[in-house]
Amino acid sequence: MDREQALKLYAASAAQGFAKAEYELANHYRGQTGRALDLDMASGYLERSARHGYAPAQADLGFVYFNGNGSTPRDLAKSFHWFKRAADGGAVIAQCMVADFYRQGLGGVERNPREAFRWYRLTATRADRCAAKSQYELYASYASGSGVRKNLPAAMAWLKRAAEAGNPQAQRALGLAYENGAGVERNPVLARTWLKRSREGVAPHDDHAHEDEPKPGRVPAPGHAH
């Protein structure tokens, strides 16, 4: 089946209210099939698909309102509404965003570290591009005692996992931990390795530097009393 035939089928299905077909048409009009953009048509189909309960469309609409897109102004309250619906429908990237909203208290959402931790824990082991970010946030939660009881071994385990998964923020934090003996035994070689890796790129769904980065306690050097 060629693309023109597929589009005709999607259009016929969309006319009957099939959410996945509406989503495919939204992607088409957003330029994902190599055709000219028509953002008004794309937005219309995307919203229809989202309202018909299609979680990928709901997640995308959450990002439209989160970033602002064309004639759509940024609206964090609407963004959270759609992210939450998508998250409840199983969209992992939306679950990560819901966690961020609860952690930061965005869009009129009351800041709730415990709820943020719950969503990060749910997504940290999923096969999604935001999983490493969630792993880093679990490190931060355990290191600072935000939303969960403070637990340094758990914090460092999640930090190492996030760093190994390619999250530059975690790589930087792990490098500094090895440099300073914070939560791990001081190791200048590993410190340089992780700090170098952290500078090589920025992972999806990640901010490279945070002012509120947790600071685990220093680990005594070998031979020193605990």
Image (cartoon, rainbow, N blue to C red):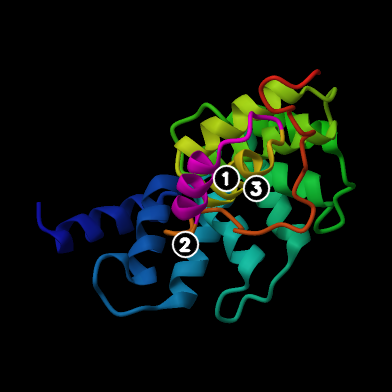
Query: Of label 1 and label 3, which has the lower sequence position?
Result: 3
Q: How many marks?
A: 3
Q: Which residue is mark 3?
A: 97
Numbered circle sitting on residue 45 = 2
Q: Amino acid at mark 3?
A: Met
Q: Quadrant of residue 171?
A: top right
The answer to whether mark 3 and mark 2 are in CB contact below 8 A is no
Stretch in magenta: 183-198
Callout 3: SS: helix
Spatial CA span between label 1 and label 2: 46 Å
Disc 2 residue type (three-letter): Tyr
Q: Residues within 10 Å of mark 2 (few under 14, many from 20)?
A: many
Q: Tell us which disc is closer to us: 1 or 3.
A: 1
55 or 176, nearer to the observer: 176
Using the image, tell me which numbered label, if any, was put on residue 206: none
SS class, disc 1: helix
For the stretch drawn in magenta, the main secondary structure is helix
- View extreme (front): residue: 223
User: Do the CB atoms of the residues marked 1 and 3 lie less than 8 Å apart?
Assistant: no
